[in-house]
Every structure is written in structure tokens, then in C-alpha cells.
Image: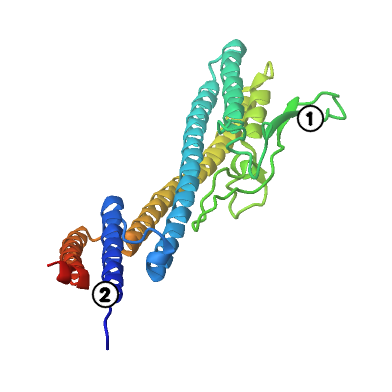
């Protein structure tokens, strides 16, 4: 086979260009720290990296949802704690009102305390979550979920006693966050505040509203000239109702606390998932720096050798031989 001078030049130039491209590619990898910069570099590794990135994106979205859930759940737990303290105050006030030595005027001062507790409880029940909704709004309530409505007057006396009652105007049910865990944001306010079991044995389907309990106690203790037996009966009923309501709120608070624990566990699992995805992505596309430096040095040595070979091929032309 005859090898012309042109063919030798062409092959040598092609070899030099190829080696130069390889050297440039490794230089780019060393600069970026990435072995796979585009799918054509390694289609299989690029697909692995893309799947890992999608997993990381989902994990980030779930993390944001968990953070929103934790914030609202912590606010709900705090609100229930405040409600528990207010009911304890109501219980102590009721017990104090049962003092047989108290005059009507002294008892009325305690009634004012009970009215203040009721007003504060209503404020807690309507507490905002800080972003336009309410902690106990259920599945959504732009306006306060608990409202005062007038009671119908007694057909005999023509007087409504108590004059108002609290109704729930939210949307019953809980709201959930978009995660694999069943974690909520807002909880059912009617179940929390108006549907406390009455504690009867055997269980009675009748329920007790925390506001109704206080309204009845306030009404009974406000009556002037009430006998000692009437006062004692009102205090006994009021304390029993407060105890049932307090027990129910404590059980709701325990569920909320468990939800916070589940949020913490879910956050750990999401963090593990994200870390695994980050590792997978790194394994798929990141550069082995030690290996890359070794490859670069080998490519550079080969390129230098090719340049020397080219310089030797240039001296093999017939004109160079004749002129020599």
C-alpha cells in the first residue's frame, strides 16, 4: 500500500485534533467538577442524575409542606394550652363561687371573672393562623369560625337565658398537607370546642359545649337571691362540665402533640431520602478528581507525543529531502 505525503499529513492532523478535543473535554470537566455536563456525555448516567434530581425536588416540596404543618400545629398546640389554663381558672372561680358565706355582690365579682374567661376562650377558638385562616377553621374559614347568635326567648318568660350561644360556622373536617404522612394543618373546631363528651356512664351521645357550660354557670350564679342549694347545684354542674371540656381539650392537645412527633419523624425520613438522592446524583455526574487529573496528564503526554510525531512527519516530504 502506498502512503502519500498528503495522507500522512491528514492522519497526523486528525490525530492531533482528536487529542486536542479530548484534552479540552477533560479540562472542562476539571473546571466544572462534573463528569456529565450534558446527556450526550453519558446517557445512562444523565438519566440517573435526572431521576435523583426529581426525587430531591419532591423532597424539597414535602419539606416545605412539613414546615407549614409544623408551624400551624405548634400554634394549635399553644392555643389548646392557653384554653386549658383558662378552664382551670374557670374551675377555680366556680369552686370559689360555691362559698356559702359569699354575698350576692361578692359572687357577682366572680361571675365577671367567668364572663372574662368565656370571652378569652372565644378569642382562642377564633385564633388566626397568621396567613388569613383560623386554627380551628376546619377545612377553611376566611372569617372567624365561631360566632355569637341570639338564643330564642323562653315562651313563658319571654327572656332568652342565656341571651346568646356560640355556633360553629367553619367547614367541618381537617386539612392535610401534601406529604406521604397524614399530617394536618387546621383541625375541626366544632369537634374541639362544641362536642366534648359529657362523661356519662354508660356513654351518652349527648355532648357538652365549653361555652354552654360557662353560659349556664354564669346564668345560674347571676340570679339574685339564689338559695345555697341552688348555688351549690350550679357550682357542681359547672365544675363537672368544665372538667369534661378540659379532659376533651387535653385529649385533642395530645393528638396535636403526636402530630408534631410524626412531623419530626417524617422530616427525618425526607432528609434521608434527599441525602440518598444527592448521593446518587453525585455518583452519576460528579467527577472523580484524582482519576480526572491522571487522565489529563496522560492526555497531555499523548498530545505532546503527537506534536513531536507531526514535526517528524513534516520532515519526510520529497522537497525537504532534495533541499537537504
| Residue position marked by numbered label 1 in the rendering | 151
The quadrant of the image that shows the N terminus is bottom left
In the image, taking residue 297 as reference, residue 184 lies left or right, namely right
Q: How is the image coloured?
A: rainbow
Closer-to-camera residue (319/174) = 319
Of callouts 2 and 1, which one flags the residue occurring earlier in the amino acid sequence? 2
Look at the image and tell me whether residue 234 can be seen: yes
Label 1 crowding class (10 Å Cα cut-off): few <14, some 14-19, many 20+?
some
Q: CA distance from mark 2 to mark 1?
A: 111 Å
Closer-to-camera residue (207/73) = 73
Residue 5 disc label: 2
Residue depicted at 26% across the width and 81% down the height? 3
Q: Do callouts 2 and 1 mark residues in contact (Cβ within 8 Å)?
A: no
* Residue 277 locus on image (x, y percent): 37, 60
Residue depicted at 20% across the width and 60% down the height? 296
Name the residue furthest top: 105
Amino acid at each position: 500500500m502506498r502512503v502519500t505525503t498528503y495522507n500522512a499529513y491528514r492522519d497526523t492532523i486528525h490525530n492531533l485534533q482528536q487529542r486536542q478535543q479530548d484534552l479540552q473535554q477533560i479540562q472542562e470537566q476539571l473546571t466544572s467538577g462534573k463528569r456529565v455536563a450534558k446527556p450526550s456525555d453519558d446517557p445512562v448516567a444523565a438519566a440517573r442524575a435526572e431521576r435523583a434530581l426529581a426525587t430531591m425536588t419532591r423532597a424539597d416540596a414535602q419539606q416545605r409542606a412539613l414546615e407549614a404543618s409544623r408551624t400551624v400545629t405548634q400554634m394549635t398546640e399553644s392555643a389548646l394550652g392557653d384554653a386549658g389554663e383558662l378552664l382551670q381558672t374557670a374551675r377555680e372561680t366556680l369552686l370559689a363561687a360555691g362559698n356559702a358565706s359569699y354575698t350576692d355582690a361578692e359572687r357577682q365579682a366572680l361571675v365577671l371573672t367567668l364572663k372574662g374567661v368565656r370571652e378569652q376562650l372565644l378569642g382562642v377558638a377564633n385564633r388566626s393562623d397568621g396567613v388569613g385562616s383560623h386554627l380551628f377553621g376546619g377545612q377553611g374559614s376566611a372569617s372567624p369560625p365561631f360566632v355569637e347568635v341570639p338564643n330564642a326567648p323562653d315562651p313563658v318568660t319571654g327572656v332568652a337565658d342565656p341571651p346568646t350561644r356560640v355556633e360553629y360556622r367553619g367547614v367541618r373536617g381537617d386539612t392535610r398537607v401534601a406529604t406521604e404522612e397524614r399530617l394536618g394543618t387546621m383541625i375541626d373546631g366544632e369537634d374541639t370546642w362544641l362536642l366534648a363528651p359529657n362523661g356519662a356512664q354508660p356513654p351518652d351521645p349527648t355532648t357538652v359545649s365549653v361555652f354552654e357550660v360557662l353560659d349556664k354557670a354564669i346564668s345560674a350564679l347571676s340570679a339574685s337571691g339564689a338559695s345555697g342549694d341552688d348555688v351549690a347545684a350550679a357550682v357542681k354542674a359547672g365544675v363537672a362540665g368544665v372538667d369534661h371540656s378540659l379532659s376533651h381539650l387535653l385529649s385533642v392537645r395530645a393528638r396535636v402533640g403526636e402530630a408534631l412527633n410524626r412531623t419530626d419523624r417524617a422530616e427525618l425520613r425526607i432528609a434521608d431520602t434527599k441525602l440518598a438522592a444527592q448521593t446518587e446524583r453525585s455518583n452519576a455526574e460528579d467527577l472523580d478528581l484524582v482519576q480526572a487529573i491522571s487522565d489529563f496528564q496522560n492526555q497531555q503526554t499523548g498530545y505532546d507525543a503527537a506534536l513531536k510525531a507531526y514535526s517528524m512527519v513534516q520532515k519526510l516530504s520529497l522537497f525537504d529531502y532534495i533541499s537537504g
